[in-house]
Amino acid sequence: MEQLGTVLMVSKAPAAWPDALDLLSSQYYRVLTARSADEAKATLSDAHVDLVMVDDGGDGEGLSLLSDLRISHPDVVRILVVDPQYSLAQKALSAASIYQFLRKPLDAVQVGLVVKRALETRELARRHRLLSREFKFSGDSLGVDGRPGVPVHPESHRFEKLIYVSEKMAQLCDLARKAAKTEMPILIQGETGTGKELLARGIHYNSNRHTSPLMIQNCGGMPDELLQSELFGHKRGAFTGAISDRLGLFRAADNGTVFLDEISEVSPSFQVSLLRFLQEGEVKPVGSDKTETCNVRVIVASNRSLKAMAEAGKFRKDLYFRLRGSELEVPPLRDRPDDIPALAEFFAAKHSNAIGRKVLGISAGVWEKLVHFDWPGNVRELENEIRRMVALAKDGEYLTTDTLSPAILAAAPRAPRVVKGFMPEGATLKEKVESLEKQLVGEVLSRHRWNQSRAANELGLSRVGLANKIKRYGLAETS
Ligand SMILES: Nc1ncnc2c1ncn2[C@@H]1O[C@H](COP(=O)(O)OP(=O)(O)OP(=O)(O)O)[C@@H](O)[C@H]1O
Ligand SMILES: [Mg+2]
């Protein structure tokens, strides 16, 4: 069985507690002992300790050790042991901010229970801190989309919270699932709003690290010192305002994942620190001369090309090579128009659900514009557009072009994309034209996921006209 934690007993006469020591050892704690405050401090600097239990001995020395530890080792749980008649001064107690005190003679079973509960409480507090962080960073993305009852397009697929239909995203998510199972760093590239953060979350929750924390840090626009201390921690007094030790995101995420967004924006000195972590698994808190180890998987994202930056000498090449253990490129929305209807439906359901509006659906005119627009802000822009339209719609109505943004309304149908390398077949002009027609009809159908009314609408055909062409060319839905 794994060890439950390390307990340090500090007493001038540790042998006076044989029962308690034996019981803790038999309950799978590692038990260390120290006979003085100095010895205790030396042990604490060498070994990882979860809880200290200090016998005060009546001279106040124990209590003052606990007060010191509160500052130097804030994560170690503190328990005080006192003589039967010892009267505890409230002030001294609060300076040490202890978890519990016990009176002698010690009852081994009570000690066992108090230690167990103390460590449980600490773990809960730790998780609470991590979760509050996760909520703070994730903003609205932890919102209603996880709610039961929000319908998702029947043909769409999901990778955690990513919704997709297109082949391009299917391939990307397959790659991401495979990369998730490795321990390598992952570099996610893609334009703004394409879903890089959602992909990173999907990877974490599909990895073996999913029960440990995912920590997210946006590196853009952060002063270097602040970023270093957020991620690697700092020692008390390392700089003005550093009033206590700080653990840092890397160590808080131990056994989990750290996601660094906008990695292209970090300073050269931060790049050195990150490289050291990737090579040695070591972090050095700001103001400390000691390095600490931790085990986290790093995922980074950038909407600028790191490769181009590395080639231009604007980003360390060695770091770039380390980071791209796996490289994932999220395509812009305009290059995967098949995703637009599924996403639009999903967002319409999500946002009408959120504000209790009963929207009937999205009108054909809107569909056409949504599919033809270029979406420079990608999925985020699409979501904002739909959210706004839902807010302006009335109960029992469709979302119509009346509330569509002017820029999207002005979207001209895209020139039909002739598939790269496509050569019309046939000898005569008639045969070549038919072969091209077959190709184009097939493409539009697949873009609308074989929704024949929408495809007919885009092609300017009646539904019957489209059905005839499907029959004539022997077109069939393939995937
Ligand atoms: N495939 C998707 N399915 C559902 N929601 C998505 C999808 N892609 C993006 N979104 C939503 O779009 C918004 C932007 O996504 P995200 O923050 O992951 O993008 P990003 O690439 O990290 O953007 P930036 O480069 O600006 O940081 C979020 O609200 C997210 O929930
Ligand atoms: Mg992002």
Image (cartoon, grey):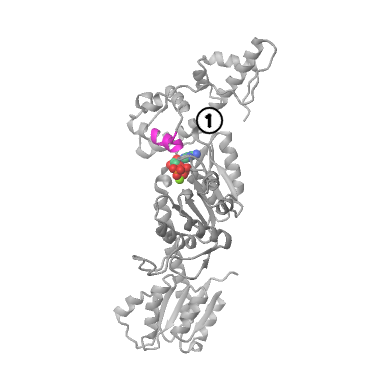
Residue 472: name its quadrant.
top right
Quadrant location, the N terminus: bottom right
Q: Is residue 89 something one can see in this rendering?
A: yes
**Mark 1 neighbour class, 10 Å CA radius: few under 14, some 14 to 19, many 20 or more:** many
67 and 313: which one is in front? 313
Label 1 amino acid?
Asp
Residue 410 in the image, given as x and y percentages of width and height? 40, 23
Q: Nearer the viewer, residue 230 or 442?
A: 230
What is the secondary structure assignment of the residue under circle 1? Answer: loop
Q: In which quarter of the image is residue 56?
A: bottom left
> Residue drawn at (51%, 73%), measured in percent from left and top?
48
In this picture, residue 259 sits left or right of residue 396:
right
> Can you tell me whether the CB of the residue at mark 1 lies under 8 Å from the nearest atom of ligand 1?
no
Q: Nearer the viewer, residue 276 or 188?
A: 276
Q: Which residue is drawn at 39% across and 69% down?
A: 236
- Asked if residue 134 is among those painted magenta in the image, a careful observer would answer no
Residue 331 to residue 11: above or below: above
- Specify the principal SS of the magenta part: helix
User: Compared to 351, does 60 lie above or below?
Assistant: below
Q: Which residues make up the magenta segment? A: 376-385
* Vertical relation: 45 (above or below) 403: below
The residue where tag 1 is placed is 338
